[in-house]
Amino acid sequence: MKNPVFERVPEKELMDDVAQATAYANANFEEPHKFFVELLHSYVSNLKHSKLLDIGTGDGDIAIRVAKKFSSSRIYGFDGSLPMLDLAKRKISENSLSERIHLKHSLIQDTPYKEINFDGIICNSVLHHINDTKSYWNYVINKAKEKSWFFIMDLARPNSISEAESLVTLYAKNESNQLKLDFYNSLLAAYTIEEVKLQLSQVYNEEYEIIMVSDRHFIVFSDTFA
């Protein structure tokens, strides 16, 4: 991937506006969210009975999909947005998964779930919201000590503003204006693979892999899979 011709444009870290959270929850993320679970399954084939941490669980869609894909897994999610958590609780209840998916209102800086050791850490489309990436990666790495692992997917910053606009047209043409704006802002706020490598080099000494998996997504994961 070529170096972008524009600098990262940070966006708001939390979707704490009810209208924004609702627009996100109502959007069609079937393709990328299904893709996330398929990729997770391809690298970590057996997650039955696993205890997983979902960072920035949002409206709960990823947690629900993972719970359905991996029977008997338990998922502990947290998010800093109360409107998002309200939507997540509703979806989880509608899918009869309240006993397997647990939620907490928290920020990464609060180091949620200190008392729980997890088998794995998952995170989808949160990193591009984060400005203090050192705190983010320190939390991920501290929770992934010993035999645990992390698996993260996020947006990669396009090579140009015009490419970002084209991606919005291609993937969000049928979505609300709010969702189109949020997607555009997220593309501009996303990190490049080289920037993520630099972030990890400052806090992580173990082996990992980072791969572009679509025209807008990358995955990064530790090699300590159970």
Image (cartoon, helix red, strand yellow):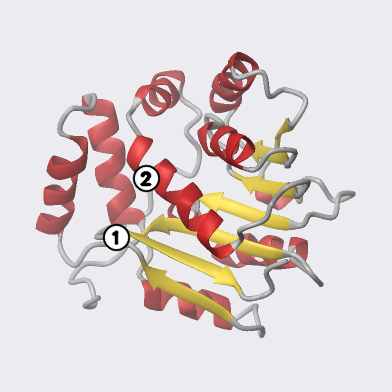
State which quarter of the image contains the C terminus. bottom right
When the figure is inspected, residue 64 is found, relative to residue 161, above or below; the finding is above
State the residue at coordinates (52%, 75%): 199
The answer to whether 32 appears left or right of 2 in the picture is right
The disc, 1 or 2, on the residue closer to the chain's N-terminal end is 2
- Helix, strand or loop for disc 1: loop
Residue 119 appears left or right of 188: right
Image quadrant assignment for residue 134: bottom right
Residue that sits furthest to the right in the current view: 115
Relative to 21, 102 lies left or right: right
| Mark 2 Cα-neighbour bin, 10 Å: few <14, some 14–19, many ≥20 | some
Q: Which of 93 and 108 is in front in this view?
A: 93
Point out residue 151 in the picture as x, y percentages from the top left corner: 57, 61
- Residue 114 vs residue 67, the one in the foreground: 67
Please say if 207 is above or below 115: below
Name the spot of residue 16 as percent of width and height, x first.
51, 29
Q: Residue 74's x, y, as percent?
A: 75, 39
Q: Which mark is residue 214?
A: 1
Of 65 and 48, the residue lying toward us = 48
The label on residue 55 is none
Picture mark count: 2
Q: Quadrant of residue 65?
A: top right
Question: Is the residue under label 2 in contact with that under label 1 (CB below 8 Å)?
Answer: yes
Q: In this view of the protein, can residue 186 be seen by the observer?
A: yes
Mark 2 is on which residue type?
Answer: Pro
The amino acid marked with disc number 1 is: Ser
**Residue 164 placement (x, y as % from top left):** 18, 53
Residue at the spot of label 2: 32
Which residue is at a point 64% across and 37% down the rendered structure image? Answer: 67
* Label 2 secondary element: helix
Spatial separation of the CA atoms under disc 1 and disc 2: 10 Å
- Quadrant location of residue 157? bottom left
